[in-house]
């Protein structure tokens, strides 16, 4: 039981590292630090569910960003499968960004 918890924790950390390599092509900050990833859930079989949003609902490259996130998660060793859910509630806003992202964009 404890070992499974530790495995999930390591897997989640590796997923976050992978997500930090995915960028919205219009913004020079990764999707994780932008606050676009709302939830990461990992089940017992190491299937991963990701709930995410976009900076704007009418993003012209929405499919590309979602596919890039799914591919990054799928490429993490130990991940068996990935399911994506794109949501717009709550709406994204600048307060969801990490301090690093705000600094990178000159908002601090």
Image (cartoon, rainbow, N blue to C red):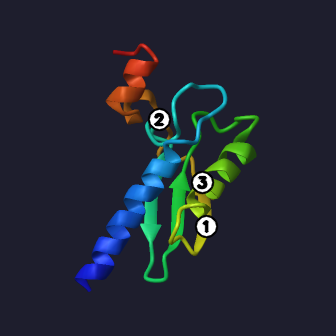
Mark positioned earlier in the residue sequence (3 or 2): 2
Q: Is residue 70 above or below residue 31?
A: below
Q: Residue furthest front?
A: 77
Residue 84, percent from left and from top: 61, 61
Point 74% across, 38% down: residue: 61
Mark positioned earlier in the residue sequence (1 or 2): 2
Q: Quadrant of residue 43?
A: bottom left
Which mark, by number, is residue 24? Answer: none
Q: Is residue 87 left or right of residue 59?
A: left
Q: Residues within 10 Å of mark 3 (few under 14, many from 20)?
A: some
- Give the secondary structure at mark 3: helix
Residue 26, percent from left and from top: 65, 26
Residue annotated with mark 2: 34
| Quadrant in the picture for the C terminus | top left
Q: Which is closer to the viewer, label 1 or label 3?
A: 3
Q: Residues within 10 Å of mark 2 (few under 14, many from 20)?
A: many
- Give the secondary structure at mark 1: strand
| Quadrant in the picture for the N terminus | bottom left
Point 48% across, 76% down: residue: 46
Residue annotated with mark 1: 83
For marks 1 and 2, give the CA distance.
20 Å
Mark positioned earlier in the residue sequence (1 or 3): 3
Q: Quadrant of residue 100?
A: top left
- Give the secondary structure at mark 2: loop
Residue annotated with mark 3: 72
Q: Quadrant of residue 39?
A: bottom left
Point 51% across, 48% down: residue: 19
For marks 3 and 2, give the CA distance.
16 Å
């Amino acid at each position: 039981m404890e070992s499974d918890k530790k495995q999930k924790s390591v897997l989640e950390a590796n997923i976050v590292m992978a997500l930090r390599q995915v960028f919205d092509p219009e913004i020079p900050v990764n999707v994780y630090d932008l606050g676009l990833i709302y939830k990461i859930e990992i089940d017992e079989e190491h299937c991963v569910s990701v709930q995410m949003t976009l900076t704007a609902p009418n993003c012209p490259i929405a499919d590309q960003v979602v596919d890039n996130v799914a591919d990054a998660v799928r490429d993490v060793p130990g991940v068996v499968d990935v399911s994506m859910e794109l949501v717009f509630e709550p709406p994204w806003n600048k307060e969801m960004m990490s301090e690093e992202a705000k600094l990178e964009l000159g908002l601090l």
